[in-house]
Amino acid sequence: GTTGATGVTGATGVTGATGATGATGVFQQFQVSVNTPNTSGSSAILLTAAPTTLKTITVTSIPAGSRVWLTGIVGWEATAGTSSIQLQILRGATVIFSTNAHAAANSAFATTNVNHVDTTPGTGNVTYSLIAVMLVGTGTAVGGITFTGSLINP
């Protein structure tokens, strides 16, 4: 014979217990400090031979054996002819990374990036700073400016 009509669907059963929480990922605590808006012309920070703090972040509760991945970008303009800039990353008051860049003419715009892994951050709360120092000439940090850090668990 023919198959009969499908019957009414029954009530939904009870939801089962929640499963165990999965493992924590390796990357934690993404910290960021940016201009708002983060565009060219969003800053007018005079840069000279004196160290100038552009951005600061703090990574908290760092466990033993961890690392911290730090990145940054600075848009800047040479304001006194041929100019050279050094960008530094400081852990507290200690320089842990630096790189130099050059602009060949007055009013020349440049963008300089930093990328570093702090393999010995210590434990607890650690503050990092992105610093600019003019080695030759003067300049202005005109933006965008971004500084990020992410805890990498052991």
Image (cartoon, rainbow, N blue to C red):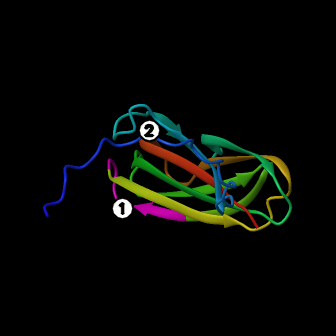
Asked if residue 32 lies in the magenta stretch, the reply is: no
Name the one closer to the observer, 23 or 154: 23
SS at circle 1: loop
Q: Nearer the viewer, mark 1 or mark 2?
A: 2
Residue corresponding to mark 2: 11
Q: Quadrant of the C terminus?
A: bottom right
Under mark 1, the amino acid is Ala
User: Label 2 is placed on what type of residue?
Assistant: Ala
Q: Nearer the viewer, residue 142 or 14?
A: 14
Front residue of 106 and 127:
127
For the residues labelled 1 and 2, the Cα–Cα distance comes to 76 Å
Dot 1, crowdedness within 10 Å: few (<14), some or many (≥20)?
A: few
In this picture, residue 92 sits left or right of residue 54: right
Q: Position of residue 87 (x, y in %)?
A: 57, 56
The answer to whether residue 71 is left or right of residue 129 is: left
Image point 63% across, 56% down: which residue? 88
Assess disc 2: are there few (<14), some (14-19) or many (≥20) residues with their C-alpha within 10 Å of its C-alpha.
few
On the image, the x and y values in percent for residue 103 come to 39, 59
Residue, x 13% and y 61% (percent of image)? Answer: 2
Residues drawn in magenta: 100-107
Q: Quadrant of the N terminus?
A: bottom left
Residue 101 in magenta? yes
- Residue that extends furthest to the left in the rendered view of this protein: 2
Q: Which residue: 48% across, 60% down?
A: 113
Q: Is residue 131 left or right of residue 65?
A: left
SS of the residue at dot 2? Answer: loop
Please tell me the numbered disc located at residue 104.
1
Find residue 33 and report its image quarter: top right
- Residue 37: horizontal and vertical position, in percent? 38, 32
Image spot of residue 85 (x, y percent)? 52, 56
